[in-house]
Amino acid sequence: MKNRYSLWLGTALAAVLAVSSMGTIHAEDGAAIPTNPGFVPNSGQINPGITLQAPSQSRDFAKIPTPDEARAALMTPVSKQPSTGDASAATTGTGAQERQGTQNTSAANDPPPSGPIGSVGETIPAKFSKRNDVLDHVPIMAIPLPLTDEQRKQIYDAVMADKSQPVAGAEALKPASELSPDQALNGMHPLPESVRGIDGVTRLYYVKAKGKVLLVEPAIRTVVGQINS
């Protein structure tokens, strides 16, 4: 009985030592294989690979039209007639066919359409319309206000006649720019009452700069229009 107990105890001890030895071997093997490749605690990165730097600006930044270019495109006459899909005629780049010979010019402000069938001047794809291509590169908040030349002059003259002073840094502002809190507090003013009734500008404020008036959406402190001298 005593010998049997000793044999059992010796077998159990040998088994424990064997298991312990195997665990040590597996632990050593596992130490060479990282369980979390690519994890960087400081940055939270969890995937391996090359760290890519975010671009400092949009690739289309250089393509953004100037306010004058955007306004010229917006004011270009476009057809309201659906296109018949005839793409053989030359185009002016506005989605309108060029008038040739003695073609009827009774609809001077509504040139014949050209482009994909069913499209009209404002929906013709940019590759068929220079006008639409320009406007497609204008930020939404920088789309020009539909003001006539006379209305723009009235607003400019009224603002420049106002006694408010240009705010610091206003020269760098342009459509789609966001005013700083200081610019909004010290340089943003309601439009003069004489022009406040013009359609499209009733709710807007202005910021005066050297040689230009910036129209601002006050709720979001964003420039939505620019009128040059």
Image (spheres, helix red, strand yellow):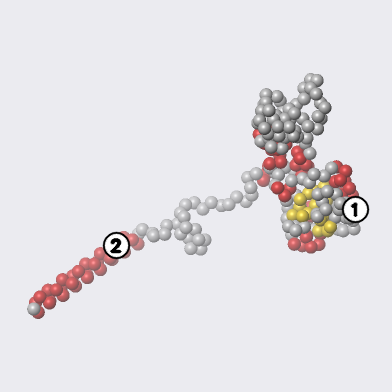
Vertical comparison of 79 with 27: above or below: above
Specify few, some or many for label 1: CA neighbours under 10 Å numbering under 14, 14-19, or 20 or more: few
Splitting the image into 4 quarters, where does residue 19 fall?
bottom left
- Relative placement, left or right, of 37 versus 90 is left
Amino acid type of the residue that numbered disc 2 sits on in the rendered structure = His
Splitting the image into 4 quarters, where does residue 70 fall?
top right
Vertical comparison of 40 with 200: above or below: below
Instruction: Please state the horizontal and vertical placement of residue 78, each as a whole percent of the image.
Output: 75, 34
Identify which residue is drawn at 89% across, 49% down.
157
Q: Secondary structure at mark 1?
A: loop
Q: Secondary structure at mark 2?
A: helix
Task: From the image, tell me which residue sits under label 1.
Answer: 194
The residue furthest top is: 101
Residue 169 versus residue 90: which sits nearer the camera? 90
Label 1 vs 2, first from the N-terminus: 2
Instruction: Please state the horizontal and vertical placement of residue 140, each as a whole percent of the image.
Output: 70, 47
Observer able to see residue 132: yes
Identify which residue is drawn at 53% across, 51% down.
52
Task: From the image, tell me which residue sits under label 2.
Answer: 26
Distance CA(mark 1)–CA(mark 2): 85 Å
Identify which residue is drawn at 76% across, 40% down.
74
Observer able to see residue 172: no
